[in-house]
Image: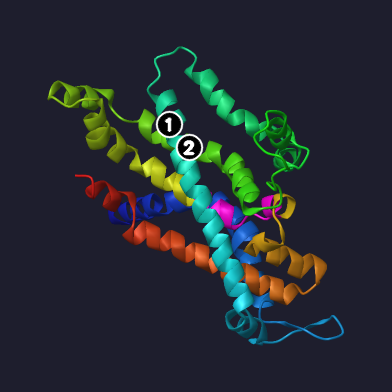
Amino acid sequence: MSILASVRSIAWKESRPWLLLSPALAIITFFLVIPACFIVVYSFWLRTAIGTEEIGFYLDNWKLIFGDPFYRDVLVNTFGVAFITTIVCAIAGYVPAHFVAFSHTRHKDFLLLLLIVPFWISYIIRTMSWMSVLGSEGIVNTLLLYIGVIDDPLHLLYSRFAVVLGLVQYLLPFMILNIYVSLNAIDKDMIDAAKSLGCNWRQAFKEVTFPLSLPGLGAGCLLCFVLASGNYITPLILGGPDDLMFANLVYATIVKQLNFPMGAALSVVLLILLGVLVTVYTRYLGVDQLAKSFR
């Protein structure tokens, strides 16, 4: 009986984590894994000339995606915009995150609250507000015309600049919060120890603060890049004809052309590429590897 009881105890200890995780795993499976499987299967169907879907295993959608340079150019443009947005967010987000993390003010919680305030406003409203700022009769052009810097309004709206600006406004709080978490977790005694050993504040930042903040910076960059690559609202509102992004292509294929199999194939392509990017980053370019380069 003692052996049987021991076996049952071991089996219970091994199965207990899975039992505790089962509700979350069930939700993920039902709302994420199963729909993704349906999309993959749907991508091999074929839309006929009369507008119906022909069930089967056809590679026509995939051949068109990998054979037509148009889709490749849209994908390159998407990743280019996402990369620029990520770099701008990293540069612009590190300073405020560092300020909040190392601030000695009693109102640190209030500063963090200010970072969350933009999420209280609809993302679409925040994006459309740039039309009143960057338009030909917007605040920027009106001010520049008033002070005599320009003679004609600048074409700021419906451009890549406007798309990047709108994405930065959307993603910057994510970057700041990720960097702040890493900076706030740094033991301040380590920085004081570096200064006591002769380092000035720049050397202490280079040798201690920045390497230890790389996990948050890397997570923020990865999150911003993925979210920017899959965004379609900002390019739809602020972008022009030359600023088509891959998510907009998926939207137009499904909603306007009603070509659901082709839209599913495009969605799977973007999902696979971003998944490969995350996997490669985690495996080969993780924060541990980045931290070693500063040692």
Comparing 85 with 232, the one in front is: 85
Question: Could you tell me which residue is drawn at 53 percent across and 49 percent down?
Answer: 85
Q: Work out whether 197 lies above or below 132.
A: above
Question: Could you tell me which residue is drawn at 68 percent across and 32 percent down?
Answer: 148
Q: Amino acid at mark 1?
A: Val
Comparing 160 with 52, the one in front is: 160
Question: Picture coordinates of residue 73 (x, y %)?
Answer: 59, 71
Magenta stretch: helix, strand or loop mostly = helix
Question: Picture coordinates of residue 246 (x, y %)?
Answer: 63, 64
Does any portion of residue 20 appear in the rendered image?
no
| Colour mapping used in the image | rainbow
Would you identify the image quadrant in which residue 258 lies?
bottom right
In the rendered image, which residue does mark 2 sit on? Answer: 92
Q: Around disc 1, counting alpha carbons within 10 Å, would you say few (fewer than 14), some (14 to 19), or many (20 or more)? A: some
Would you identify the image quadrant in which residue 239 lies?
bottom right
Q: Which residue is at the far top?
A: 106
Callout 2: SS: helix
Would you identify the image quadrant in which residue 149 lies?
top right
Q: Which residue is at the far left?
A: 197
- Is residue 234 found inside the magenta-colored segment of the image? yes
Question: Could you tell me which residue is drawn at 71 percent across and 40 percent down?
Answer: 151
Tell me, for residue 95, which label it has, or none. 1
Q: Work out whether 104 lies above or below 273.
A: above
Q: Amino acid at mark 2?
A: Ala
Q: Which residues are magenta?
A: 223-235
Comparing 83 with 102, the one in front is: 83
